[in-house]
């Protein structure tokens, strides 16, 4: 029986508990603050906000390099020479990571790379779904596993609600005019994944509390989400009150005990502090 090992990038924000449970191997992405570059996950995420407050400049995020990928792939094969690697990649249109893995895989065999078209907790949802698929289908071929990932990625929904557009403006993702207009009108645009891109979507008006509740209600109304995949969380600075508001709003709409995620440095540098996210995979 073929042994499959799943790899992904650190920008998936996959938790240590899920890494251990499913035997996931994580390839580092990178964050540059000033003249220093760090592996994503090797420092406190709030450091990116301290850096911005101090310098007025956003940290720069960058994808995994071919060498990063090679190190992880070769380590796996040294321990499991006959294994097949299923690499579920961070959205290919947003970073070089996917191409880096393709380059690294040219010198090796039995590596199957698929673009998740997702980031952060959305990518984690796809990785976990893939791990469960392999567990329940131990005789699946690599082609069948890749086909599963390509199917489930199209049903994965991820909506992000920033508390402020300041970090998106600083990163050039929204204009100064849009930023000022949203601030004056108390608008909170949501950010969604569309064909792998982070794009602005529905705008909510009013207090952040009101916008968060409406975001959650619209999410479960618009999408036929599998309850086992429903996940909420956010970037550092999201208060316990807002977390519980998200959970209680889900409960009132028939969804109990959501999973939780904590956003890492890559997505947090765009969403800014205190952003809320909700993720789920639609039923077929």
Image: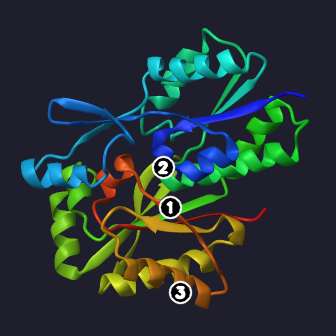
Side (left or right) of 281 relative to 70: right
Q: Real-space Cα distance between discs 3 and 1?
A: 16 Å
Residue tagged 2: 13
Residue tagged 3: 248
Whichever of labels 3 and 2 marks the residue nearer the N terminus, that label is 2
In x, y percent, where is residue 268?
A: 34, 54
Q: In percent of the image, x 73 and y 21: which residue is there?
A: 80
In what quadrant of the picture does the C terminus appear?
A: bottom right
Q: Circle 1 — which element?
A: strand
In what quadrant of the picture does the N terminus appear?
A: top right
Proximity of marks 2 and 1: CB atoms separated by less than 8 Å: yes
Checking the image for residue 161, the label placed there is none
Q: Circle 3 — which element?
A: helix
Side (left or right) of 97 relative to 55: right
- Badge 2 local density, few (<14 within 10 Å), some, or many (20+)? many
Q: Is residue 101 above or below residue 182?
A: above
Residue tagged 1: 261
């Amino acid at each position: 029986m073929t042994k499959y090992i799943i790899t992904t990038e650190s920008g998936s924000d996959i938790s240590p508990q899920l890494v251990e449970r499913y035997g996931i191997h994580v390839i580092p992405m990178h964050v540059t603050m000033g003249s220093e570059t760090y592996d994503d996950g090797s420092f406190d995420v709030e450091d990116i906000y301290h850096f911005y407050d101090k310098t007025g400049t956003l940290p720069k995020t960058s994808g995994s390099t071919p060498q990063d990928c090679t190190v992880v792939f070769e380590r796996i094969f040294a321990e499991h020479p006959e294994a097949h690697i299923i690499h579920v990649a961070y959205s290919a249109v947003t970073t070089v990571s996917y191409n880096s893995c393709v380059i690294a895989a040219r010198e090796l065999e039995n590596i199957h790379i698929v673009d998740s078209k997702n980031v952060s907790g959305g990518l984690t949802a796809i990785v976990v779904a893939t791990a469960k698929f392999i567990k329940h289908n131990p005789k699946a071929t690599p082609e069948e596993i890749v086909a599963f990932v390509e199917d489930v990625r199209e049903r994965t929904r991820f909506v992000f609600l920033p508390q402020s557009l300041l970090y998106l403006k600083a990163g050039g993702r929204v204009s100064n005019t849009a930023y000022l207009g949203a601030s004056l009108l108390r608008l909170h645009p949501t950010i969604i994944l569309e064909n792998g891109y982070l794009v602005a979507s529905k705008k909510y008006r009013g207090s952040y509390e009101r916008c968060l509740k409406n975001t959650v209600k619209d999410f479960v109304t618009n999408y036929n989400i599998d309850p086992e995949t429903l996940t909420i969380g956010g970037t550092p600075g999201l208060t316990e009150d807002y977390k519980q508001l998200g959970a209680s709003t889900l409960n009132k709409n028939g969804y109990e005990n959501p999973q939780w995620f904590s956003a890492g440095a890559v997505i947090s540098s765009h969403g800014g502090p205190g952003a809320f996210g909700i993720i789920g995979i639609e039923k077929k």
